[in-house]
Image (spheres, helix red, strand yellow):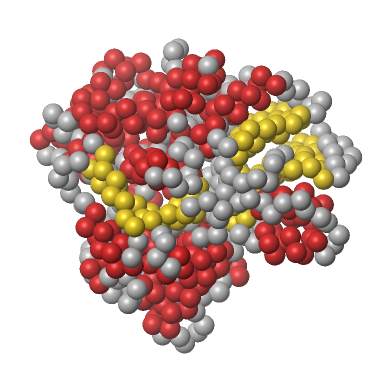
Amino acid sequence: MCRIYGTFNTRTGDRELRTAAALLHHGGPDARSFVRGADWALGNNRLSIMDPQGGAQPYHHDGVVVVFNGELYNHDELRARLRGRGFRFEDRCDGSILPALYLTYGDSFAEHLDGMFAVAVIDLRAEPRLVLATDPAGMKSLYYSWDSRTGVLHFASEIPALLSFPDVRAREDELGLDAYLTSKTPFGERTMFEGIDVLPPAATATASRTDGLRISERPLGYESAEGAAPGRSLEEAGGELRAALETEVSRLLTADVPVAAITSGGLDSSLVTALAARAARGALHTFNIAYTGRWPGDERAYAARVAESVGTTHHQVEIDPASFPELLSDVVWHLGQPNADPITLSTFSLFRAVRDAGFKVALTGDAADELFAGYARMSQALAAPEGADWSGAYLDHLAAVPRALRARLYTDDYAATVRARPALPPELHAALEHGNGSRLTRICEAEQRYRLPAYHLRRVDHLSMASSVEARIPFCQPAIVRFAAGLPDAHRLTSAGVKRALYAAAGGLVPDAVLDRPKQPFTLPVTAMLAPGQRLWEMARDVLSPVSLRADGRLRGDTVEALFTEQAERPSDTASLALWSLMGHQLWRRQFFDAATRFDTAVQAPHALEGAAA
């Protein structure tokens, strides 16, 4: 696991590369290296997971240079295959196979990888060309800036490092605010910065002086679904799913450093924990997060019950809500752009505790809801009659600020501006309404293609790597994705319940107290915490002051004030999430666009930032 960065078709100096490396230090503190030619450069910061004494990057072989971020779970199989073709390897690190794999298969090399990855290849055998590739789920992000006029490309695993290159300017996409409030973070290849994009999942991008930049997308795996065979009962499907998950969880436990598990107390992480504990034979540590005081939705008792039932060493992490204002600035920085889910603070704090306890790898239960239909909005969409605008209502459920409230929140000028460009990818609505398969199939595929990578996986990746922890996600493994896609609707969601195959898989393995409890999201109880007298309230009042809103010019101060009044007198999830989201956006603007931003300070003195992030 690492962080990578680089440039193509431009001369890059050592100082620029060292600055980018310093800004990525948290994600790869174990080694730092880069290599450059006359008009290209590749860099890597390493978090040593496999073969810590080997695996030095960049990898070189016969005119091919590679840097790599991620984890490859089939590297032993690929190494054996490549040895049969005459290649030799000096170590057993997973990434060291990549030059030979590229030399064997060319631009299609990523089709042979099983894991999470972002790979950059410089091919110097003829005219220099750059090849970038991302994994099918979108677990490892790769941001880039492409200048079509000059043919210059810069890329990095995180936005702050990308912005450290002098040619990449921090320019706010004015319409990004609407995209953010519409879907909690921009979907697709879009970011909150003008001129900065992110490669989609399963993408292969090539850049050369002759052909410019070309991006193609590989199949995501839905087309080769491997669900339960026709006619199988729900119980049989659950058994097959448990066996598949057991295999993947066991594979993901393989590491040359200690591995832990995140246990929220819900079905998904509890099942992963139970399978991991069985594979680790009692040598597993688990982590749960809670908050000082008494708050709604506290799950620590459920997590403790799971840990006790499967025999793990359990760590109960507790953070004080009074620390949230300080934490929020760090969270916004590491994400690089706002994410409106309050869970970001919990995620950041939890992985920091995992690191402090001595673990570099943690298994999580993320992505099960998208695959196996676990959200209430899915049930509501299926219940909508034919002819109703079910997809419009469904998309509004994804918003940080509902459509009707956004209409009241925007100034007249900004409302006119946003009408010129849709906040969501145009093909998303079409995929929901007119894609292949049943309504539920279309919903799950849209969630996996658009929402899961942008909103969910980037958050987990950036906020775990902020503390030098690799998050591994069994539910994102291709075998599990294909299995879920092949299930009949009735084995995912009916009036009898959500994630039915997953519940069947967990029966007898996860405590009944967890299986029988009502579903609740793993998030921060921001509705209760954003209240007069709390530090979070004081921070929101300061950040969303009338002066700040006037300087922004896109939001109505009277509507924001009405939200504060509503939240003080009649607390609601709608008002609290709207205020939280607006606060996050303003904090992001302060860090990246104000005259005295933390970003500017970091670029001038990157080692000071390393100390703050460590």
Residue at the farthest left position: 569
Residue 105: x %, y % from top left? 79, 56
Q: Is residue 13 above or below residue 297?
A: above
Question: Which residue lies at the image location 28% right of the left edge and 50% below the top edge?
Answer: 316
Horizontal arrangement in the rendering, residue 139 relative to residue 84 (left or right): left
Q: Quadrant of residue 149?
A: top right
Question: Which residue lies at the image location 36% right of the left edge and 76% below the top edge?
Answer: 504
Decide if residue 500 is in sight here. Answer: no
Residue at the farthest right position: 126
Residue 467: x %, y % from top left? 45, 38
Q: Quadrant of residue 490?
A: bottom left
Horizontal arrangement in the rendering, residue 74 relative to residue 605 (left or right): right
Q: Nearer the viewer, residue 454 or 331?
A: 331
Q: Nearer the viewer, residue 466 or 157?
A: 466
Total numbered labels placed on residues in the image: 0
Horizontal arrangement in the rendering, residue 489 relative to residue 400 (left or right): right
Residue at the farthest bottom position: 231
Q: Is residue 575 above or below residue 366?
A: above
Q: Nearer the viewer, residue 87 or 568?
A: 87
Residue 391: x %, y % from top left? 39, 56
Residue 428: x %, y % from top left? 49, 52
Question: Which residue lies at the image location 39% right of the left edge and 74% below the top edge?
Answer: 505
Question: Which residue lies at the image location 34% right of the left edge and 31% below the top edge?
Answer: 328
